[in-house]
Amino acid sequence: MKPRNNGEAMDAVGATRHFRTIFLSDIHLGTRGCKAEMLLDFLKVNESDTLYLVGDIVDGWRLKKHWHWPQTHNDVIQKLLRKARKGTRVVFIPGNHDEFARAYCDANFGDVELRREAIHEAADGRRYLVIHGDEFDGVVMYARWLAVLGDWAYMVVLEMNHWFNVARRRLGLPYWSVSQYLKHKVKNAVQYIAKFEESMAELAEKRGVGGIICGHIHHAEIRPVGNILYCNDGDWVESCTAMVEHDDGRMEIIDWSKVRDVSMFDSYRGGSRKTRSLAQAEVVAPALAATGTDGVPTPVDLPGDRGESDVEPTATRAPRSPSPVEG
């Protein structure tokens, strides 16, 4: 049984919520499966002192084969850069799909820090290794051709998932991830996830930290693995999940698809947005730290939003060369 929200989250989703830290990964900008509208909605009402982008923010693999870059993907980049300019510490840790940025690690691009990995110290004193995780995926490391083949098959499943949810929406049904369902039902996938989690925990022990925060496998989870607190913040192509750190150091994963009942077609068409209270949202995992188990940019107007846009108009922005962070 999945635990529910502990009640400390915002009662009205429209109100801005501030966290100590937010962790996002596997956004896969540049693919049709990316839920950019949902992410923009999340970023609009959730602020933090620090924002970690834990890899696969831009999908270079797919962009090399087929250029897909709608306005909403541009808006996500602008929103992230705007947060950095306004004082949020933004740390970008490239993954295997945006590995082109790894050549620039340990450098800063404007207000964004690029790092190969990072050590995050939570408010409760627990130290976490923050890393994408592909380095410990045998398929990616030793059989890249198989990883590329798997990526193609995965995109086919995501395309099926998209049209399946278009049909569900027309029937008045909420979003439901086909790929997540298959992942939980296929024995080899379950074994792969378990082995990945164990490998991450072993790495954390070797580094002398009490926890590890990663992405890569598109499976949000917070659970103790031995003496290590394993944390995976999920993705924004299947489940639309983010991990947040509260002011007392507790970690929590929020499934934004359960908070916002909206389809991608509604967003494109400017349809209405159904809002649920976050207190009713399904939270994938509770804060376990307390258990002692150590084209041209234009303003975006999301459905239902009013007032000044968070994306700056083109006319007010000075031309500049794109950085790796900007895709």
Image: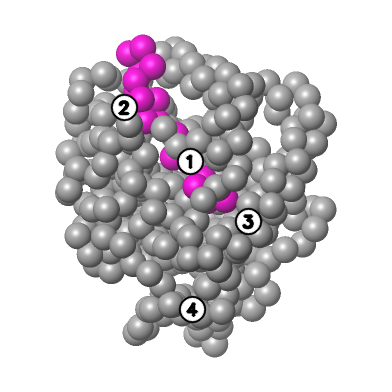
- Residue 234 is tagged as 1
Residue range in magenta is: 222-239
For the residues labelled 2 and 4, the Cα–Cα distance comes to 43 Å
What kind of element bears circle 3? helix
Task: Identify the image quadrant of the C terminus.
Answer: bottom right
Q: Earlier in the sequence, mark 1 or mark 3?
A: 3
Q: CA distance from mark 2 to mark 1?
A: 20 Å
Q: Nearer the viewer, mark 1 or mark 3?
A: 3
Q: Marks 3 and 2: CB-CB under 8 Å?
A: no
How many marks do you count on the picture? Answer: 4
SS at mark 1 in the image: loop
Q: Nearer the viewer, residue 20 or 70?
A: 70
Q: Residue at x 70, y 28 (%)?
A: 140
Q: Which residue is mark 2?
A: 127
Query: Where does residue 296 sit, x and y in percent of width and height?
Result: 64, 78
Q: Kindly indicate whether the residue at mark 1 contacts the one at mark 4 (C-beta within 8 angstroms).
A: no
Question: Per the image, is 253 magenta?
Answer: no
